[in-house]
Image: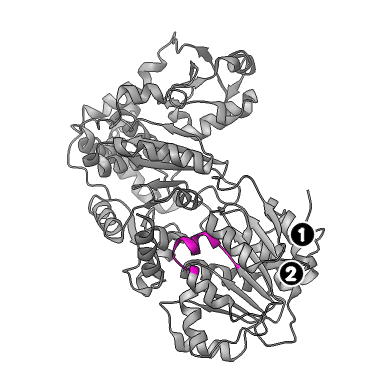
Amino acid sequence: MSSFSELGVGEKVLKSIEELGYKIPTPVQQQAIPVLLKNQQDFLGLAQTGTGKTAAFGLPLIELLETTSKVTQALILAPTRELCMQISNDLADYSKYHPFTIAAVYGGASIERQIQQIKRGAQMIVATPGRLIDLIGRKVINLKAIKFVILDEADEMLNMGFQEDIDSILIHTPPSKRVWLFSATMPAEVREIADSYMHNPFELVIGKKNVSASNIEHRYYVVQERDRYAALKRIIDAEPEIFAIVFARTRLDVQKIAEDLIRDGYNADSLHGDLSQQQRDKVMNRYRNHSLQILVATDVAARGIDVDDVTHVIHFHLPEEAENYAHRSGRTARAGKSGISIALVNSRETGKIRQIEKKVNALFRISKIPDVELVCEQQLLKLVRKIKDVEVDTAGIAKYLPVAFNELSSLTREELIERFISLEFNRFLDYYRNAPELKSGYSHNEEKDRGDHYHEGIRLFINLGSMDGFKESSLRNYISETASVPAKNIGNIILKGVYSFVYVPVKYLPIIVESFTGETYKGRNVRIEEGGRRTDSDSRKSKQKVKQFQSEGKGKFGRSDRNKEKKSRKKESKRW
């Protein structure tokens, strides 16, 4: 595996990226950087979001620019303000030991301040199309000396209706420039841009065209329309450690969902074009530092969000166009991590799922909405872990302990644990005690039709579950790694407290059973059986844990048509 120095990156840039913790180049960086450093032809790179494309073009760009010249030599176009800021910040980090000036030009900020910055001299300009055209019209920016034009997230810019803007901008650049185009998908419009403005480009494809990242697990839940919001809450409650982005179709939808979540006690907020610049910055800062758990956003607003630890992307509404599904789901599973993409659909929208599957080459698994028992198990497990991992200030509480010990001396160990857990857990149980089961919006026939994705192959019982710290994705990966079976061939997983059911193709049965013979997990013998037979009390343990607390709960729980769409997105993007 190549290092950055082997790719041809200079010492000053190496020093910068080493300080940032960059050690091993990603696949797109390994293949793009040497080609771009040669500076012999245009470049067309197709790679998913979160694969390191900014460094792939940023590092060679820094090496190729003339530090002694103050004229603008490079122009990077991005679809949104958020991505524009991210790219400019990254380039500033990469060029820490180079005397470069980088100007970020975008709407929603002081144009006078941006004009002053450009007039002082900027070798690189990172811009959104709308604001750049404004500055060109004011004769503030001269693109006659431009040597490099980089179109980042080109598919999204075109999807947002920026085709004419891009044409207008490129007219002002010299014919001798190099054009580097990066995109996550390759719709016809991107190919048209390449054919119109690029000459015999070097084409690099990482993975397959228009596909979703392989480390993302795709699920969908078919719900009745009236239960869409209730299903969202149930999914969030079943994943206590969730750190998610929820996508909705319009700004009004986003605002309403966020307000409802906040009202119901969730740590959520909204991100859309109707917010002021100050409000948007505040929301994003909270999300980046994890003081905000659920971000509800429109497609345009969330474009360019680069947060490595997003665990889930939830599509409250499916996007209008299949390509946007890949963009949305790409907000998770970044920097080599895994993630989960969840779609909520009604029975009339299931056909869209099949269209998206074909378009982005992703396998969707139909799932059932988490039931009350599973939700309660997960919340109980979260509480137990919180108690177990709390930092104890022994010296600080020492003088108060005798009083506490005396007050609690009549309680047994079991009674004490029950009361401490019930103190927090009772409110949650009371909320869910009479909660109705959410009926699935799909028919039995559809479940049968999707049997290859839902109940695939033969059912296996394994004595591991959520109480062992597993989620569906992590259990799938554990079985895959232990038995050397591709994770994509492991079917649906029904996760319970201390056991689970796993569906696998019959041909993998012998190797899985053999691989788990003698296997242990955290000192516990792992047992895996065909058909889901159970000879011990595994199936009763988790039920007993929940019923024990359900019997004592008190109090109320309050959980702390294409062109039209393009015009709408372009209008919103001007706010960004």
Magenta-span inclusion, residue 466:
no
Q: Is residue 516 left or right of residue 313?
A: right
* Looking at the image, residue 372 lies above or below residue 158: above
Would you say the residues marked 2 and 1 are in contact, meaning their CB atoms lie under 8 Å apart?
yes
Residue nearest the viewer, comparing 428 with 316: 316
At x 55%, y 87%, the residue is 117
Tell me the residue that label 2 is attached to. 13
The CA span between labels 2 and 1 is 9 Å
First-in-chain label (2 vs 1): 1
Location of residue 145 by image quarter: bottom right
The colour scheme applied to this rendered structure is one colour
Q: Which residues are magenta?
A: 151-163
* Looking at the image, residue 261 lies above or below residue 110: above
Location of residue 50 by image quarter: bottom right
* Looking at the image, residue 344 lies above or below residue 531: below
**Mark 1 Cα-neighbour bin, 10 Å: few <14, some 14–19, many ≥20:** many
Location of residue 522 by image quarter: top right
In the structure shown, which secondary structural element does the residue marked by tag 1 occupy? Answer: loop
Residue nearest the viewer, comparing 265 with 236: 236
Three-letter amino acid code of the residue under disc 2:
Val
In the structure shown, which secondary structural element does the residue marked by tag 2 occupy? Answer: helix
Q: Is residue 508 left or right of residue 23?
A: left
Return the mark for residue 4: 1
Three-letter amino acid code of the residue under disc 1:
Phe
At x 39%, y 62%, the residue is 566
| Whether residue 471 is visible | no
Residue nearest the viewer, comparing 5 with 538: 5
